[in-house]
Amino acid sequence: MSARSLAPALVAALLALSPPLAARDDEAAPPETHSAASEPVAATTDATKNETPAAEGATPAAENATAPAPQLVVVDAVRDLGKIQRGERAEVEFTLENRGEGPLKIKSAQPACGCTVASFDAEIAPGGSGHVRAWLDSSTLAGAVAKSITVVSNDPASPRAVLTIKAEIVTFVTVSPAFARVLQVRSQPAAPTVVQLWSGDGTPVEVLEVKAPEPWIVAHARRAAPGELRAEGPADQWRIEVELLPDAPLGPLADKLVVRTSHPRQSEVEIPLSGFVRAVLTPAPAIADFGSLGRNVLDKSRFVLKLFNFGSEPIEIQRAAIDVPFVTVATAAEDPGRRFRVELRLAPDAPKGKFEGTLRLETTSPSMPVVEVPVRGKIG
């Protein structure tokens, strides 16, 4: 075979052995195929990547939009009681309405000081009404006052509502001073304690009766004379004088006088009564109590009390004695005739155990020549 005849055959063989040329850009690529079992891959957008999961337990917006909501409406949020007598307890009832479509739940009703919530309806049906019941305590109030109550509910638009109680606290019958304080020394003459009483609103008033809480408390009422009037009151005043009988018991006094009047708005007035009935000679403290002591401190242990003279005349301590053999007593005048220091000391060799006795002070007082003070303690 000649060389000319071999050339075409060689070219064809070389082309068969070479890899196929890449398709040109303008040629259509064959379509990609998937098996029936393959799942399409969803595209992920930026919005999907940045989406925050909803909080656990949150109610979807669509559900909130469709749930029936309650609506709290207060029929009269401000109640003005006008003038009320100081000390009076005024009851108030507020009406609440539910003008929504869901049940209205009242979670709490919190009062400000000066008023107290007695009760409230915890749930009000749609279209229904309920109440908050409260009362105003005017015993510590005076003048114009406004007290609030905060109601908390499940109303989504307005969960809080404020109720207000207004009043003008007045005293129809005025007492000056507002209390009677009696300090009296037994067996000693004393001037009566005086309070004045008059009408606070101009209505003519008479004192009909004064009731004392104990038979040894004496109270009298009469119209005050021109020279006895208190400057802050009107020309028509009543004078109430209080004094104690000589046998009034020793100690503190805490009670009240009850005055009946003709005033149409206040027929009864209570006047606090306090004070103290003292003996002419009064030790302070009334008991000499050493308490519990260790033997290592006996040489330093002492008890000091004072003896006060509330009588009109000065006195002297003539003798001081104690019936506990290991206790000594010494006296000294701090304010001669009026106040004395009495010092008790334990002996270093005092025996172990409890001890009790009586300190006896002999004085020059004609009404109280002897004062006795209990003495006690324990040595460990």
Image: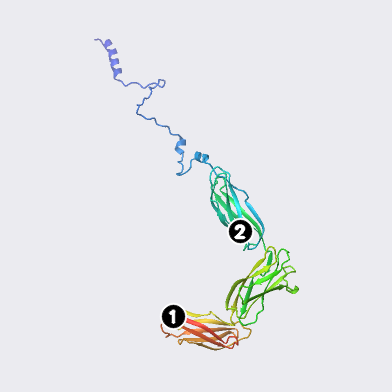
Of residue 34 and residue 294, the one placed in the foreground of this image is 294
**Quadrant the N terminus occupies:** top left
Q: Seen from this angle, which residue lies furthest left?
A: 1
Q: Residue at the location (58% across, 75% down)? A: 252
Mark identifier at residue 136: 2
Q: Earlier in the sequence, mark 1 or mark 2?
A: 2
Residue 317: percent from left, percent from top: 56, 87
Crowding at label 2, few (<14), some or many (≥20) Cα neighbours within 10 Å?
many
Q: Is residue 324 above or below residue 6?
A: below
Q: Is residue 289 left or right of residue 181?
A: left
- Res 213 quadrant in image: bottom right
The span from disc 1 to disc 2 (Cα, nearest Å) is 54 Å
Residue 377: percent from left, percent from top: 46, 80
**Quadrant the C terminus occupies:** bottom left
Looking at the rendered structure, the secondary structure element under dot 1 is strand
- Res 240 quadrant in image: bottom right
Looking at the rendered structure, the secondary structure element under dot 2 is strand
What's the amino acid at mark 2? Answer: Leu
Residue 212: percent from left, percent from top: 63, 73
Rendering colour mode: rainbow
Residue 111: percent from left, percent from top: 57, 56
What's the amino acid at mark 1? Answer: Lys
Q: Residue at the location (52% across, 39% down)? A: 66
Q: Is residue 154 above or below residue 88?
A: above
Q: Which residue is mark 1?
A: 378
